[in-house]
Amino acid sequence: MCHNNIMNKLTSKDSSYAFLFGFLACQASVVFFTIFGLIICSIFKIETTQFELFLNQSYGYLLGVLAMDAGLLLTFLFINKNKDNKIISKPNTKRILLYTLIAVASFFCLYPLIVCIDSLLIKLNIPLNSIPYTLDTKGYFISIVSLVILPAVCEELLFRGLIFKGLKKHGKAFAIMITSVMFAIFHMSISQTVYPILFGLLLSVIMFYENNILYTILVHLINNFLSLTLSYFNISLVFNHWSYILLATTLACIFIAFVLYFTIKNNKENEKQPLNKAEKIVLACCLAIMIIFWIITFLTSIL
């Protein structure tokens, strides 16, 4: 019995395949959803322009996100099947309060940095990754599902519940860093690269210490909710003075120092298992493929 449990542990290959297959399954779901929509348009004699307009509305965007997150969920279920991978335990009330406070603090600690990055990208005429529809009251509540709840649950299951756990045996720092980089690349947007890396570091640290996906989902959910709510109320600090850059840099450095402290703290180096040659090749290939996709996405957005 013990032998079977060991054999069924997640590996770095599982993490690599989850990363690549998650993206591909996500895109395949969107393609399927689009083809299905076009077939419906053909059957009921609906103009394709109307279908495209629908996709850029809140309900259409929600269906698109459902298709993408279905791909992530299917990837998680397929790779996690028959694995000895416990990621959920009963949450502690004090822990819930603690991570709620950490989620709020981390968001406002990194928010000025995001404003600075967005302002720089705008000056460079690089498009931001924005919501395609008007964020009115109806759009806001629909977005709570499409941009807050669904991504928080499905992305955490894939990245912290699967990818991080598969890399964990190779060392805490290694698993935290690689998972965070993967998390950023997965978003396929230059405007969502720095923030997902930093935020991913925090989520991975939480997963390491708690081994409970419910806490990372909570932090991710609160982060998404605050971002959406600020957009809904059109609250945005303006990057127009050197003091704001100084504030953003200081807060970001405090956040990074905080995460690094808990990453290095009690790091048991003797428990690390080195990557073998096959694991290195698979991980490197998956990262390379996704980086190429990221570059293509970036170039197509600016050309």
Image (cartoon, rainbow, N blue to C red):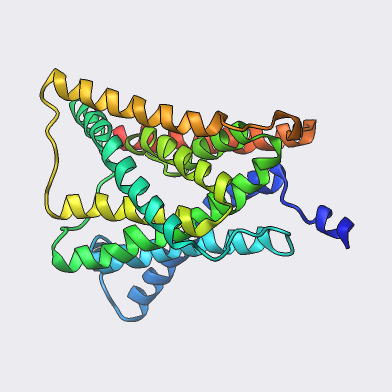
Q: Is residue 250 left or right of residue 80?
A: left
Residue 70 coordinates in the image, percent (x, y): 49, 65
Q: Is residue 6 left or right of residue 298?
A: right
Question: Residue 300 occupies which quadrant of the picture?
Answer: top left
Residue sitting at x 82%, y 53%: 6
Residue 27 seen in the figure: no
- Residue at the extreme front of the image, as rendered: 94
- Residue at the extreme bottom of the image, as rendered: 44
Question: Residue 48 occupies which quadrant of the picture?
Answer: bottom left
Residue 168 seen in the figure: yes
Residue 12 coordinates in the image, percent (x, y): 70, 42
Q: Is residue 215 left or right of residue 143?
A: right
Q: Is residue 22 above or below residue 119?
A: below
Residue sitting at x 70%, y 35%: 170
Q: Is residue 276 left or right of residue 144?
A: right
Residue 113 coordinates in the image, percent (x, y): 27, 31
Residue 1 coordinates in the image, percent (x, y): 88, 63
- Residue at the extreme top of the image, as rendered: 242
Q: Is residue 264 above or below residue 151?
A: above
